[in-house]
Amino acid sequence: MADLPDAGTCYELLARMSLIRRFEEEAGRQYQRAKAGGFLHLGIGEEATIVGTTSVMRDEDYLIGTYRTHGHAIARGTEPKHVMAELFGRVDGTSGGRGGSMHIFDRERRFMGGYGVVGGNLPIAAGLGLSSEYKGEDAVTVCMFGDGASNTGNFGETMNLAALWRLPVFFLVENNLYGMGTSVERHSAQTDLSKKAEGYGIPGERVDGMDVVAVREGVAEGIRRAREERRPTVLEAFTYRYRGHSAADPEVYREREEVEEWREKDPIEAFARRCVEAGVLGEREVEEVRAKAEEQVTEAVEFADGSPEPALDSLYENLYVLDSAAGWYAVDERSPEPHRGEREEESMPEAARELAEAGAAYGGRPDGPRPQDRPNPAEHGDAHEGVEPEVAEEGGDSPVAEEVED
Ligand SMILES: Cc1ncc(C[n+]2csc(CCOP(=O)(O)OP(=O)(O)O)c2C)c(N)n1
Ligand SMILES: [Mg+2]
């Protein structure tokens, strides 16, 4: 068993894990009260994997995760009140209330999200690694994803480029034994997930994801390899979510006894016990950590509740890209003439107008019209007005039309 770090670090690890646990318990409660909308995926039980990982990252390093990332943001230093406000869909949320639970984001702390598409964060991690490489930065990108995500095409494509281009990326598989209701044995031909990138020459290790100290050690080595040797690693951390996949999960795929067994290995209880038995922390400190977490989460709920809803006329803001990535994007495949909401191209330079006429959509420019100055399609009827929807001819065999009728 890996040695305990110094008392200050132990205190900090316990405090972070306890805060995340308390936060998520409360998030679940607020969801049931309909204060938080959309989907809600809790990582209760996975705190040692999360905190063990972030605790050995530098401020300059990037982190990107999945849709189960309230804890990851808090572990990176995002204030719980801003995460709670995001769950509540309020303006003080990390994404101004637009992302909700699945899209927590904090650019300042280099937490690059919350990502809803399973495996979709992997290529983005490679991109972040490539940008660090390109800019000659020392930063490492840590990419965390689930066991289920290791089956996606993105996994192979990302591993290939990460190895080929020697990107400073570290991959951590949060193996909680299930992808929704499907166990690893039933969803992955190779059940040793640490071996899944072996063919690309990427080394893999396995670690007890319920042991925060073990995770720290494994991750520290992987990050070192990425930073110094420019070589990626896959670390598979065995962990467990005590709650369902999302808030709406009847959990028919696992036995109650299995959950109980894993509860015995509760990463927070186990670590607190170990610290006390080793004389590194006192009972009083463990109690203090709990009380502080309680206090912070109560404050977070009050803050989120007091934060305003986004204004209705801001509905069309921030739809495309950040100001720093201005440009034209070929996303409009409707018809070449300008549509409602795109009138600003009248004041655009010739090149931009040509792009618009060729069917590109305006993605925002720092010196261009602000989104709120554009006509609001909601006030003027359907933004797609004038475009005939594709309708199956009578007697036609459109499967879509049939499905609708069913
Ligand atoms: C590309 C894609 N396919 C399917 C889904 C639906 N889906 C959401 S979560 C999930 C399971 C993923 O499991 P895993 O990667 O193990 O992560 P965990 O939820 O266990 O943290 C699936 C299939 C999705 N969001 N994206
Ligand atoms: Mg999983």
Image: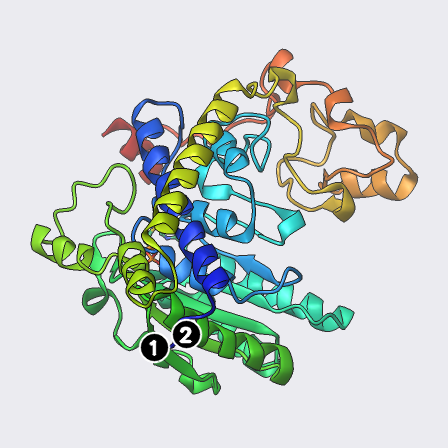
Query: Does 169 appear above or below 291?
Result: below
Percent coordinates x, y for residue 366 in the rendering: 83, 38
Please say which color scheme the image uses: rainbow
Looking at the rendered image, the quarter that the N terminus falls into is: bottom left
Q: Which residue sits furthest right?
A: 349
Residue under the image location 47 percent in, 70 percent down: 171
- Label 1 neighbour load within 10 Å: few <14, some 14-19, many 20+: some
The image quadrant that residue 266 belongs to is bottom left
Mark 2 or mark 1: name the one nearer the start of the chain.
1
Percent coordinates x, y for residue 63 in the rendering: 55, 59
Percent coordinates x, y for residue 402 in the rendering: 28, 33
- Residue 206 tag number: 1
Q: Quadrant of ligand 2?
A: bottom left
Looking at the picture, tell me which residue is in the foreground, 167 or 75: 75
- Label 2 neighbour load within 10 Å: few <14, some 14-19, many 20+: many
Q: Secondary structure at mark 1?
A: strand
Query: Does 360 appear above or below 314?
Result: below
Looking at the rendered image, the quarter that the C terminus falls into is: top left
Query: Does 232 appear above or below 385?
Result: below
Alpha-carbon span between mark 2 and mark 1: 6 Å
371 relative position to 399: left or right: right
- The residue tagged 2 is 235
11 relative position to 397: left or right: right
Q: Secondary structure at mark 2?
A: strand
Q: Give, as a three-letter code, the residue at label 2.
A: Leu
Q: Are marks 2 and 1 in contact (CB under 8 Å)?
A: yes
222 relative position to 133: left or right: left
Percent coordinates x, y for residue 123 in the rendering: 54, 64
In the rendered image, is residue 374 in sight? no
Residue under the image location 66 percent in, 34 percent down: 318
